[in-house]
C-alpha cells in the first residue's frame, strides 16, 4: 500500500540525516505506528508520504505508483490527514471544516451536506448541534472528532495521523483512542500514525516502527517488541514491566475457557461426576437451559455431598470479552479470588479465567514472539 | 440559545457611528440657524457645509482607497516565500513617509505636483501606506504555519490555501490597519485646504481669517466627529472579521 525503499532525507547544513535509509512496507488495512523521541524523523517520514517533504534519496510507492510521479494535489486529496487539534481552520464552522476536501474535489452541495451529517454521526457528534459551531466553541475531544471526520470526508483509503491525540488530557485521550479503534474496525483504512507515546503505539498499532535519529531500529507487532526489544534503546522506550504491558495486549475473549454448565436438576452423583471431568473445576448453574449467576466449584461440591444448591455461590465479579488481561488481573487482586467469569454483552456468562491462564498466556506470547 | 455579548456588541458600535454623525448634523444646524453675526451667516450655509464635507470625504476615500489597493497586495507579495526577505526593507521605506510630518509631505508634494486636490490625495496616500502595509504583513505572518500546512497537506491548491485560509485569518489585522489609516486621513485631509484642495479645512482657514469662533469650531469639530464615527464603523467591521 505504502512502500518506502531506502528513503533518506538530508537537509543542507545538517550533519546527520533526518531520515536515514528507511525501508518500510505499510500493509493495506493496518495501523502502522511510527514511534520515537522528538527529532527521530517520524514526522518527516510521514510528511514524505503526502509530499509535504521531498525525499533526498530512495522511492516511496503508494498503491503501486512512485509518489514523485503522482500529481501532488490529487495525491493529497486521496489521503486523509489529521494533525493535532490546531489543524482545524478557526474561521470556519465545523461543517465547512469537514467539507474542505469534498469542496476541493468539486462535489455537489447536497452531496457534501449529506456527507457532513453522516460523518458527524460516525464520530458521535449531533449534526444539528455541531454543524454550525466554530472550533473555539468545542472541547479538545470534540475538536479531535471533527478532525477525524474531516480526514474521512472523501473516504480516502490512506490516512496519516500526526500525534492526533497529543494535546488531550489522559482520560479524553483514552476515550478517543477507543472510539477511533472502533471506527477503524469498520473502515479498515491503511493508517500511518505518528506518536512519541509508546503506550499509545502499543494500544493503537497493528505494527510499530521504532525510530531513533532517523533510523528504524525495530519493526514488529506490539507483542514482538515487548517480548524482544531489539536493543537497549527500545527496552528503555518500553520502560520495563514488559510482562505487565503484555497483559494489556491480551484480551479476555482470547484468554477465557468455555465454562462448564451444570443443570440444577442434576442428581448428586451426576453432579460429582461432571465436576470430576477435566476443565470443569468450576461450573455455572443453569435451570431450564438458562445460565444463572451462580457457580459451584469442585471442592465445595464434594463437601456438600454433590448438592448443587448447597454448594452454589453467587457470581459477583465478571469481565467483558474486550477487557484486557491486565484489567482481569487487577480485578483478581481486588477480590482476592484466583479466577473470574467473562460475560458477553447480553450479560450471559460465557467463560472463566483462572490466574494460571494469565501466567501461561504471557509465557506463550514470549515464545510466539521468538518464532 | 441566548445571544452572547459578542453577537450584540456590533449594535453598540453602530449606535456610536450614528451618534457621532448626529452630533455633527446638530452642530451644523445650530451654526446655520443661529449665526453669531451677518458675516457668519453669509459664510455658512447648508449647501456650503455639504459641499465641503463631500470634498473632504472624497479626498479621504480616494487616498485611503489608493493606499488599500497598493499596500494590501504589496503586503501579500512580501509574505510570499520568494519575496519575504524584502519585507523589512519595504517597511523601512514606507516608514520614512510616516516619520515626515504630514504638513511637510503636503508641502513637498506641492513642489512636485503643483496645487489642488490631486496633490493632497497623493500626499495622504503615501502617508497612509505604512499602517496598512505593516498590519497586512503582521496579519499574514501570525497565521499559524501548522494551519496552512494542514491545508496544504489535505490537498488545497496554493491559491485556495491563500484565499480560504490565510487571508480570512489575517483579515481582522488588515482591517485594523485600514481603520488606523482612514482615521488619520480624515484628520490630515484638513491640510488639503492649504494647497487649494478644498475640504473642511476651508472652514478653519475662513474662520481664522474673519476671527469668528463659530466657523473655526465647526471646521475643527466636523472632521473630528467624522473621524470618530469612521473609527467606530471600522471597529465594527474589524470585529466582524475577527475569528
Image (cartoon, helix red, strand yellow):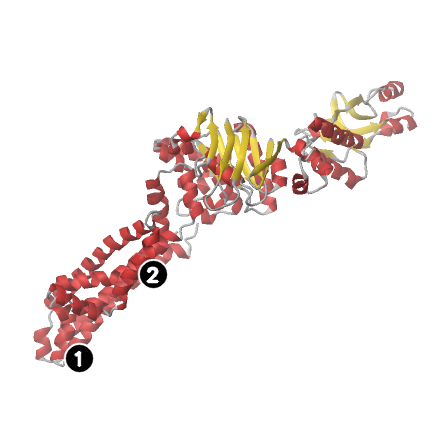
Residue A93: horizontal and vertical position, in percent? 41, 44
The answer to whether residue A156 is left or right of residue B221 is right
The residue drawn where x is 65% and y is 39% is A234
Residue ID for mark 1: B213
State if disc 2 and disc 1 touch (CB < 8 Å). no
Residue ID for mark 2: B12
Measured along the vertical axis of the image, is residue B83 above or below residue A207? Answer: below
The residue drawn where x is 27% and y is 61% is B94
**Of A247 and A112, the residue lying toward us:** A247
CA–CA distance in space, label 1 to label 2: 33 Å
Measured along the vertical axis of the image, is residue A1 above or below residue B142? Answer: above
- Chain of the residue where label 2 is placed in the rendered structure: B
- Chain of the residue where label 1 is placed in the rendered structure: B
**Of A76 and A258, the residue lying toward us:** A76
Query: On the image, which quarter does residue B235 sit in?
Result: bottom left
Residue neighbourhood size for the residue with mark 2, other residues' Cα within 10 Å, grouped as few (<14), some (14–19), many (≥20): few
**Of A283 and B113, the residue lying toward us:** B113
Measured along the vertical axis of the image, is residue B212 above or below residue A295? Answer: below
SS for tag 1?
helix
The residue drawn where x is 53% and y is 34% is A21
The answer to whether residue A305 is left or right of residue B232 is right
Query: On the image, which quarter does residue B164 sit in?
Result: top left
Query: Is any part of residue A11 visible from this angle?
Result: yes
Query: On the image, which quarter does residue A202 sit in?
Result: top right
Q: Nearer the viewer, mark 1 or mark 2?
A: 1
**Rendered-image quadrant of the C terminus of chain A:** top right
Query: Is any part of residue B179 visible from this angle?
Result: no
Residue neighbourhood size for the residue with mark 1, other residues' Cα within 10 Å, grouped as few (<14), some (14–19), many (≥20): some
Amino acid at each position: 500500500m505504502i512502500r518506502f525503499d531506502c528513503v533518506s532525507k538530508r537537509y543542507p547544513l545538517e550533519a546527520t540525516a533526518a531520515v536515514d535509509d528507511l525501508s518500510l512496507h505499510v500493509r493495506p488495512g493496518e495501523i502502522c505506528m511510527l514511534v520515537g523521541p522528538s527529532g527521530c524523523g517520524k514526522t518527516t517520514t510521514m510528511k514524505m508520504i503526502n509530499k509535504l517533504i521531498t525525499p533526498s534519496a530512495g522511492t516511496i510507492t503508494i498503491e503501486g505508483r512512485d509518489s514523485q510521479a503522482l500529481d501532488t494535489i490529487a495525491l493529497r486529496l486521496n489521503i486523509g490527514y489529521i494533525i493535532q487539534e490546531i489543524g482545524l481552520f478557526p474561521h470556519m464552522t465545523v461543517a465547512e471544516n469537514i467539507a474542505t476536501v469534498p469542496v476541493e474535489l468539486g462535489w455537489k452541495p447536497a452531496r457534501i451536506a449529506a456527507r457532513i451529517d453522516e460523518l458527524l454521526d460516525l464520530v458521535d457528534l449531533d449534526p444539528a448541534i455541531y454543524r454550525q459551531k466554530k472550533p473555539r466553541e468545542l472541547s479538545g475531544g470534540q475538536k479531535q472528532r471533527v478532525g477525524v471526520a474531516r480526514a474521512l470526508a472523501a473516504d480516502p483509503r490512506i490516512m496519516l495521523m500526526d500525534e492526533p491525540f497529543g494535546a488531550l488530557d489522559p482520560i479524553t485521550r483514552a476515550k478517543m483512542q477507543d472510539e477511533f479503534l472502533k471506527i477503524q474496525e469498520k473502515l479498515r483504512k491503511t493508517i500511518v500514525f505518528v506518536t512519541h507515546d509508546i503506550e499509545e503505539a502499543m494500544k493503537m498499532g497493528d505494527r510499530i516502527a521504532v525510530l531513533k535519529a532517523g533510523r528504524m531500529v525495530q519493526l514488529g507487532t506490539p507483542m514482538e517488541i515487548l517480548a524482544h526489544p531489539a536493543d537497549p534503546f527500545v527496552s528503555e522506550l518500553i520502560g520495563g514491566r514488559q510482562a505487565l504491558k503484555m497483559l494489556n495486549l491480551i484480551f479476555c475473549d482470547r484468554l477465557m475457557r468455555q465454562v462448564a454448565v451444570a443443570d440444577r436438576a442434576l442428581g448428586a452423583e451426576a453432579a460429582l461426576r461432571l465436576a470430576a471431568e477435566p476443565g470443569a473445576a468450576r461450573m455455572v448453574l443453569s435451570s431450564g437451559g438458562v445460565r444463572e449467576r451462580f457457580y459451584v466449584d469442585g471442592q465445595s461440591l464434594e463437601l456438600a455431598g454433590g448438592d448443587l444448591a448447597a454448594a452454589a455461590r453467587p457470581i459477583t465479579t465478571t469481565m467483558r470479552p474486550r477487557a484486557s488481561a491486565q484489567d482481569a488481573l487487577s480485578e483478581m487482586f481486588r477480590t482476592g479470588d484466583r479466577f473470574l467469569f467473562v460475560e458477553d454483552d447480553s450479560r450471559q456468562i460465557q467463560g472463566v479465567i483462572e490466574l494460571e491462564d494469565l501466567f501461561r498466556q504471557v509465557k506463550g506470547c514470549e515464545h510466539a514472539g521468538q518464532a | 440559545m441566548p445571544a452572547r455579548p459578542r453577537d450584540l456588541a456590533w449594535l453598540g458600535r453602530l449606535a456610536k457611528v450614528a451618534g457621532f454623525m448626529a452630533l455633527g448634523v446638530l452642530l451644523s444646524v445650530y451654526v446655520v440657524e443661529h449665526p453669531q453675526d451677518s458675516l457668519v451667516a453669509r459664510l455658512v450655509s447648508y449647501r456650503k457645509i455639504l459641499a465641503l464635507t463631500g470634498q473632504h470625504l472624497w479626498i479621504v476615500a480616494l487616498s485611503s482607497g489608493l493606499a488599500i489597493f497598493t499596500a494590501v497586495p504589496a503586503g501579500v507579495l512580501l509574505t510570499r516565500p520568494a519575496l519575504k526577505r524584502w519585507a523589512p526593507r519595504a517597511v523601512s521605506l514606507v516608514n520614512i513617509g510616516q516619520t515626515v510630518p504630514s504638513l511637510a509631505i503636503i508641502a513637498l508634494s506641492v513642489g512636485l505636483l503643483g496645487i489642488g486636490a490631486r496633490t493632497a490625495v497623493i500626499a495622504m496616500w503615501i502617508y497612509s501606506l505604512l499602517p496598512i502595509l505593516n498590519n497586512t504583513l503582521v496579519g499574514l505572518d501570525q497565521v499559524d504555519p501548522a494551519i496552512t500546512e494542514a491545508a496544504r497537506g489535505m490537498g488545497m491548491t496554493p491559491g485556495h490555501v491563500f484565499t480560504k485560509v490565510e487571508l480570512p485569518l489575517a483579515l481582522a489585522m488588515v482591517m485594523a490597519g485600514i481603520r488606523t489609516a482612514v482615521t488619520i486621513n480624515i484628520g490630515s485631509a484638513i491640510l488639503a485646504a492649504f494647497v487649494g484642495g478644498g475640504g473642511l479645512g476651508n472652514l478653519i482657514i475662513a474662520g481664522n481669517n474673519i476671527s469668528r469662533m463659530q466657523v473655526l469650531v465647526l471646521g475643527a469639530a466636523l472632521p473630528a466627529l467624522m473621524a470618530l464615527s469612521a473609527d467606530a464603523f471600522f471597529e465594527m467591521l474589524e470585529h466582524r472579521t475577527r475569528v
